[in-house]
């Protein structure tokens, strides 16, 4: 039994994500750290005019897109917007034609739809953790997202 449990744990890809914005809206960065079977892969990127929430969503999207086959996934995020959107609000939004309970259009629908589609390929478990509270991979994802913003804002050739 223990070897089966160990094998099942090895089959889970653990992903830490974060988004950041310099101004909101403003230049934004996203980052994801994928860990599986003792290996790590770091992804990051930036956009010139965006919001923090879009970057949080994009971090999860890019991480799931990086997986080459359907996997069990555990995503750690410090974004309640992302976690609650996927675990509490998404089904209601779809049922109401992408409207909130207040009958307003869902913000970032394009990204929610992409994330929803990716989550249908994988078995995703969402875990919230407090940001800037010392979790090493959350802190690393935050640094990567902020570095992506700095690279975007840096003058050409530097």
Image (spheres, rainbow, N blue to C red):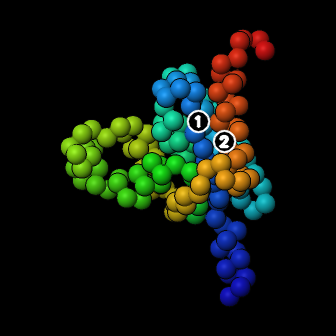
60 left or right, relative to 144? left
Q: Relative to 123, say whether 23 is above or below.
A: above
Q: Relative to 21, say whether 117 is above or below.
A: below
Label 2 or label 1, whichever comes before in sequence order = 1
Crowdedness of circle 1 by 10 Å Cα count: few (<14), some, many (20+)?
many
| Alpha-carbon span between mark 2 and mark 1 | 7 Å
141 left or right, relative to 57? right
SS at mark 1 in the image: strand
Residue occupying the far top of the picture:
156
Q: Relative to 54, say whether 149 is above or below.
A: above
Q: Quadrant of residue 128?
A: bottom right
| In the foreground, 78 or 75 | 78
SS at mark 2 in the image: helix
Task: Identify the residue at image location x=64%, y=27%.
Answer: 149
Task: Identify the residue at image location x=41%, y=44%.
Answer: 112
Q: Are marks 2 and 1 in contact (CB under 8 Å)?
A: yes
Q: Name the residue under label 2.
A: 142
| In the foreground, 55 or 120 | 55
Residue 150: x and y in percent read 69, 24
Q: Mark 1 points at which residue?
A: 20
Residue 7: x and y in percent read 70, 74
Residue occupying the far bottom of the picture:
1
Residue 113: x and y in percent read 39, 44
Crowdedness of circle 2 by 10 Å Cα count: few (<14), some, many (20+)?
many
Task: Identify the residue at image location x=43%, y=55%.
Answer: 84
**Is residue 130 visible from the viewing direction of this image?**
yes
Residue 98: x and y in percent read 27, 44
């Amino acid at each position: 039994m223990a070897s089966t449990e160990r094998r099942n744990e090895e089959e889970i890809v653990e992903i830490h994500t974060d988004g950041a914005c310099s101004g909101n809206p403003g230049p934004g960065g996203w980052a994801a750290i994928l860990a599986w079977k003792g290996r790590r892969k770091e992804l990051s990127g930036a956009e010139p005019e965006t919001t923090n929430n879009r970057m949080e969503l994009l971090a999860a999207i890019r991480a799931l897109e990086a997986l080459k086959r359907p996997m069990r996934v555990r995503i750690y995020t410090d974004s309640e917007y992302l976690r609650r959107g996927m675990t509490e609000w998404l089904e209601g939004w779809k049922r109401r034609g992408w409207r909130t309970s207040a009958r307003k259009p869902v913000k970032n629908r394009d990204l929610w739809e992409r994330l929803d589609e990716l989550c249908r390929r994988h078995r995703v478990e969402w875990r919230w953790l407090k940001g800037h509270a010392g979790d090493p991979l959350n802190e690393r994802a935050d640094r990567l997202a902020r570095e992506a913003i700095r690279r975007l804002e840096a003058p050409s050739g530097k």
